[in-house]
Image (cartoon, grey):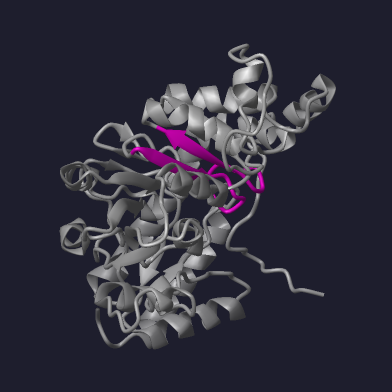
Amino acid sequence: MATVDKIPFNKPFIAGRELFYIAQAVTFGNLSGDGHFTKKCAHLMQERFGIPKVLLTPSCTAALEMAAQLCDLGPGDEVIMPSYTFVSTASAFVRMGASPVFVDIRPDTLNIDEALIEDAITERTRAICVVHYAGVACEMDRIMAIARGHGLRVVEDAAQGVNSWYNGRALGSIGDLGCYSFHETKNYICGEGGALCINDPQLIQRAEIIRDKGTNRQRFFRGEVDKYTWVDVGSSYVPSEICSAFLYGQLEEMDRISDRRQEIYLRYLQELLPLQQQGLLQLPEIPEGCTSNYHLCFVLLPTQTLRDELLEYLRSLSIRAVFHYVPLHNSPCGSQFAPGLHLPQTEQLSSRLIRLPMYYELSAADQQLVIDAVRNFCLSRVSVPI
């Protein structure tokens, strides 16, 4: 039997009327998808984030796969992206036959370094996929200018960036396409779930077709055609209505959830700041113009050895902290696309990072136990300043 951590890394939660809406969905008699709550979730996000069209999907991975297909990629094409990301960012494009071109990250935000993108562009480059790490925006003005100058599509992997903003614009609303996640580890959850944000209106009709198994069924439902049939390559990218009902209960409470996460995040920073001032660890930064959704709080230790020791120390106290990611260019599959590639910032930062427990119901007392544990470890074990 698996042991239960006293303080887990993440914990699913109910914020409002989620269970009531699930019961309502059953009463409405439409559980298979694109029912009442799927449409309400999409409309809410379109209005709040200024996105022309939002299509809910079973996962952010599914949304990324749809985005890759909408970019019309094929063998020989290249997509620029960070190596410091979850595997879905790359695999969605690889499935289309394209090759990822990995670029290093910035040391302050751990986002793709926009200053390195232009040098990575070749005659085969077709798109740039940015990843908004920790809910903090990439430097989108510069990235969009580069993309437009070279005729490239921009896909925002905003899995961690729902309800984060960049210079007054919602993440997911800036590139040609954006992708959201509602996995249970994210800010707003439904177990598994995602959304594709379509900011280029010319892509909307094809996106609907791809999402609905390659058929023009949505046009049929709107009365635009007298029957629906198979018109393109697609798949089943429609989420269960039960998931959408749960999600709508979360999205209704978006501000309250964000405020709670901000409270937890700021307390971590306030309490751990003296350790940063002593050079014993490094805390996250949010650049000017970026409004975070406070998706996660991480600390960077001076060395990988100290990072691993702190993880083990926290585990001994039944506190679950984690690290991520294994850089994709160092992974068994990713290294095939970039043999011998060295990305110094990605490699050294990923080896020193720990994500602290961060969830809606994290109590002040439990958070204090985490803070005290990190403080005690650093004061007793860290002798090499960052």
Q: Where is residue 137 in the image (x, y as percent from the top left)?
A: 31, 47
In the foreground, 317 or 338: 338
Q: Does the magenta stretch include residue 63?
A: no
Quarter of the image for residue 229 reads top right
Total marks in image: 0
Q: Where is residue 124 in the image (x, y as percent from the top left)?
A: 27, 58
Q: Residue at x 78, y 23 (%)?
A: 24
Q: Can residue 67 be seen in this view?
A: yes
Of all residues shown, which one is farthest toward the top? Answer: 223
Q: Position of residue 264 (x, y in %)?
A: 46, 51
Q: Can residue 327 be seen in this view?
A: no
Above or below: residue 213 compared with residue 35: below
Above or below: residue 267 compared with residue 162: below
In the foreground, 300 or 163: 163
Q: Which residue is drawn at 27% across and 75% down?
A: 343
Q: Where is residue 268 in the image (x, y as percent from the top left)?
A: 41, 58
Q: In which quarter of the image is the C terminus?
A: bottom left
Q: Does the magenta stretch include residue 178?
A: yes
- The region drawn magenta spans 176-198
Quarter of the image for residue 82 reads bottom left
Q: In which quarter of the image is the N terminus?
A: bottom right
Q: Which residue is drawn at 60% across and 34% down?
A: 250
Above or below: residue 139 compared with residue 311: above
Horizontal side of 225 relative to 382 (left or right) equals: right
Q: Residue at x 25, y 82 (%)?
A: 385
